[in-house]
Amino acid sequence: MIAKLRSQLPDAWQFFVAPALAAVLPWKLAYRWLRWLSRHSRSAFDEPAQAAAATAPDYLAIADREAFAANVRLNCLWDTADLYLSLLRGRHAALPWHVQQVGAWPRDSHFIAAGFHHGHGHWVFRTLARAGFDASLVSARWDRADYPGLPLRYWYGRLRGGDVQRLSGRPVVFRPGAKAQLARALDEGAAVVSVLDMPPRMAPRGQRPVRLLDRDASFPDGTLELAKAAGVTIVPYWMEFDLDRGVRRFVIGEPLDPADPATLQKLADLLDRAIRLTPSAWFFWPEWPRWIADAAAAADPSEATRRAG
């Protein structure tokens, strides 16, 4: 029993104790704490940091791998702390001073809010609520069976999903069977929140070619197809970072036409710019080599046959 409890201490620390402590401190002190922890300790989120540091320098000029890994740990801690910052605030509460909104959500039409696995997505739901929108998020299910021996990760996911539902005002929509539910949400006046950068391994259907980080990659087209069918626009959003001061800018872009053949590449270009500005904030670095290979195989059937052989 003691050994089992001891095995859970790292997850208790990185998913609950360290980020929750940051959330209750004055933010300047909290950010110093998170930054110190990310640089002087590998006790929190070192696994994703090392995975990202092993991959990113092959695709971008990363001068200092150790500093990059520290910033990945910082990004993970920061993102996790957002849950606790959110739990301490009402649904329509103002954004804290260190999260600055740039741009505004459309007031006169329905839309799909399209983001990426770059930055900290929890704030999209609060900004939508403050603009008067309920929102539907499509997500993979949090199944306890997917976390054998890692119960705290499962419960953290449940806690985060519960807060997303509180902020959204609508239940999270789970795959499969999400399309009809999302169409109904749009018809009822809610916004739909989608993430575009899903690799073929995770979203094999409807992948279309894009250029990203000077490589041939692909994004799924489900978000665009849903928007076209519903007659709504795609409104991109992204996060910009000041890693020195611990300040973020939540940026809302101009609406895009889902029927425009250039829209998917425009969205990829937004992600490309965001990654180049703050490469440590992209959660999908470990997926990137296989992503490129899968996109190449989809574009060239002979490559797929060669890989299978």
Image: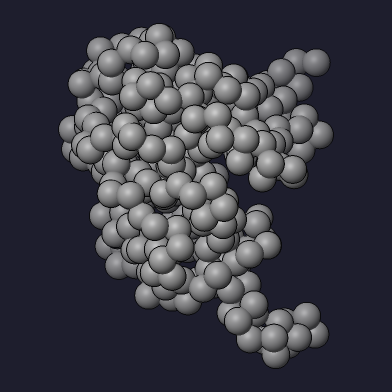
Residue 168: give x, y in percent of width and height: 50, 23
Residue depicted at x 43% and y 70%: 261
User: Total marks drawn?
Assistant: 0
Residue 177 makes an appearance in the image: yes
Q: Quadrant of the C terminus?
A: bottom right
Residue 249 shows in this picture: no
Q: Pick the residue in front: 141 or 245.
A: 141
**Left or right, 105 with reference to 233:** left
* In the image: residue 170, left or right of residue 252: right
Does 304 appear above or below 259? below
Instruction: Farthest residue to the bottom: give it.
Output: 302
Report the residue at 49% width, 30% height from top.
Answer: 189
- Which is nearer the eye, 276 or 77? 276
Q: Can you tell which quarter of the image residue 7 is in?
A: top right
Residue at the (49%, 39%) spot, across then down:
193
**Up/down of 233 relative to 272, above or below:** above
In this picture, is 75 found above or below 189?
below
Q: How does the figure colour the protein chain or chains? A: one colour
**69 displayed left or right of 101:** right
Q: In the image, what residue occupies the spot 39% across and 69% down?
A: 262
Q: Looking at this view, name the residue that lies furthest to the left.
A: 245
The N terminus appears in which quarter of the rendering?
Answer: top right
Percent x, y for residue 197? 50, 55
Residue 71 x %, y %: 34, 44
In terms of image quadrants, where is residue 145?
top right
Q: Residue 21 or 183: which is nearer the viewer?
A: 183
Percent position (x, y) of residue 225?
A: 56, 57
